[in-house]
Amino acid sequence: MTGNNEIALPTSGLAEDILARFMDSAQQDIDRRQHDEIRVEAVVHHLVTFKLGVEEYGVEIGSVQEIIRAADITPVPGAPIHIRGVINLRGKIIPVVDMRVRFTLPGGEESDQRRIVVVEAEGKRLGMLVDSVSQVVKIPAGIVEEIPEEATSAAENFIKGVGKLDGRLVIILDLNRSLLLT
């Protein structure tokens, strides 16, 4: 009779045979645990992070097309308030969303650090005007938590989750919700 931690004894009863079966069983347990850990760690968020004020935000790197200096934004009369204007990027006209306005944050100071993060959301190319671009980070899914319901309204919930990384919080954005132009 064998259980989870028991092994069947070989008929010979030799110590080498018993030890070999025990080692095989132990190695199988180790292999199974390592496989499970690898599968859990395989779910990782690869994020491009940027700042708006002192807060750090991140978007999935697969959505980011490029990052450019914030220059030559042409205002568009009658555009929604969060649309700063448009840019001409290699012959394509791309709307630029002022993320501070979109998130109802106070206005920031103009600086050389401001960037436009060009992303693709719902099949559309858009620019996100941010204060600065920080870095590319990997955050295991196990340390990403959902934002509490009390922290945002359902209509304004642009957040996929919050990642805890090296003593700081990275707010992970849902691009499809945060960049809707309506």
Image: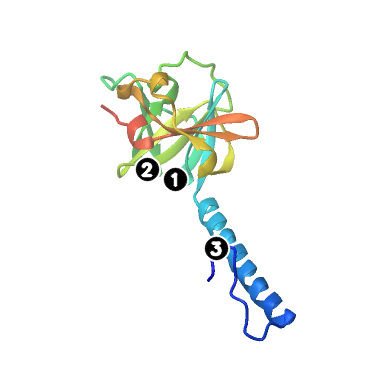
What residue would you read off at disc 3? 4
Q: Residue flagged by tag 2: what amino acid is it?
A: Glu
Q: Earlier in the sequence, mark 1 or mark 2?
A: 1
Q: Residue flagged by tag 3: what amino acid is it?
A: Asn
Q: Nearer the viewer, residue 112 or 90?
A: 112
Q: Position of residue 22 (x, y in %)?
A: 66, 72
In space, the residues marked 1 and 2 are separated at their CA atoms by: 7 Å
Q: Nearer the viewer, residue 42 or 33?
A: 33
Return the residue found at the far top. Answer: 106
Tell whether label 2 touches label 1 (CB within 8 Å). yes
Q: Is residue 171 above or below residue 6?
A: above
Q: Secondary structure at mark 1?
A: strand
Q: Quadrant of residue 34?
A: bottom right
Tell whether label 3 touches label 1 (CB within 8 Å). no
Labelled disc at residue 7: none
What residue would you read off at disc 2? 120
Tell whether label 3 touches label 2 (CB within 8 Å). no
Other-residue count near label 1 (Cα within 10 Å), few / some / many at <14 / 14–19 / ≥20? few
What residue would you read off at disc 1? 65
Other-residue count near label 2 (Cα within 10 Å), few / some / many at <14 / 14–19 / ≥20? some
Return the residue found at the far right. Answer: 15
